[in-house]
Amino acid sequence: MYEAEQGLMAEGFRSVAGVDEAGRGPLAGPVVAAAVVLDPGDPIEGLADSKTLAPGRREALFGEILLRARAVAAAAAGPREIERRNILQASLWAMARAARRLAPRPDHILVDGNRCIPLALPQTPIVAGDARCACVAAASIVAKVLRDRLMERLDGFFPRYGFLRHKGYPTREHLAALQAHGPCRLHRRTFRGVPGRFGE
């Protein structure tokens, strides 16, 4: 999992960050991005694509990352930005904002996916980077845990949609709630499956 970072450091890069996002597929809520610089002298065991980890394991690794990483930052793009930019561009901009918040600033970024982010730093996009690179896997875990926690809190403000359970993804329960109540302001009105009227 550390081969990409080690290769870049062998080329002379001193600080390599991984960036990833969570929440491209949901019908509601933000897309959350994270950027992580790991300590190569203190490898974290068990890092993997956040989608493959059980929630309890994700939470445990999240704590390890916050405790042991050299730098961690996060950013989000809300529903209105997603509507304005489209989900791909909103995700790229959120990842760029997260990377920009890292202190100290990295000198190379590994980006999950096949596109670079809008940031003037050396970058390498890696398809399935969250399953192949430790720092990208760490970023995927941070982004996923932060987004899930946010959606659980937002459930208290919009209880009839069930965000606590599905986090905004298009489950049968969520689609039924949308049909019954219409969308709330957390919904992405340009996404298929979201009716074109506001309920709250």
Image (cartoon, rainbow, N blue to C red):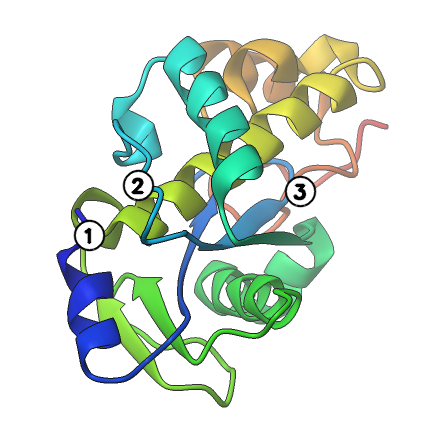
Residue on which the image places disc 3: 196
On residue 2, which mark appears? 1
**Image height check: is 147 above or below 102?**
above
Q: Residue at x 43, y 35 (%)?
A: 141
Determine whether 117 is above or below 1 in the image. Answer: below
Q: Which numbered disc covers residue 43?
A: 2
Q: Tell me where residue 103 appears, x and y as whole percent.
A: 64, 66
Please name which of the two marks, 3 or 2, marks the residue nearer to the observer.
Answer: 2
4 displayed left or right of 183: left
Disc 1 crowd rating (10 Å Cα; few below 14, some 14-19, many 20+) is few
* Between marks 1 and 3 in the image, the one whose residue lies nearer the viewer: 1
Q: Is residue 8 left or right of residue 191?
A: left
In the displayed structure image, the side of residue 135 where residue 170 appears, left or right: right
| Quarter assignment of residue 183 | top right
Q: Earlier in the sequence, mark 2 or mark 1?
A: 1
Task: Tell me residue 179's x, y (percent).
Answer: 61, 19
Q: Earlier in the sequence, mark 3 or mark 2?
A: 2
Badge 1 element: loop
Q: Position of residue 101 (x, y in %)?
A: 66, 66
Horizontal and vertical percent position of residue 30: 63, 44
Q: Residue at x 61, y 54 (%)?
A: 73
Badge 2 crowding class, 10 Å Cα cut-off, few under 14, some 14 to 19, many 20 or more, is some
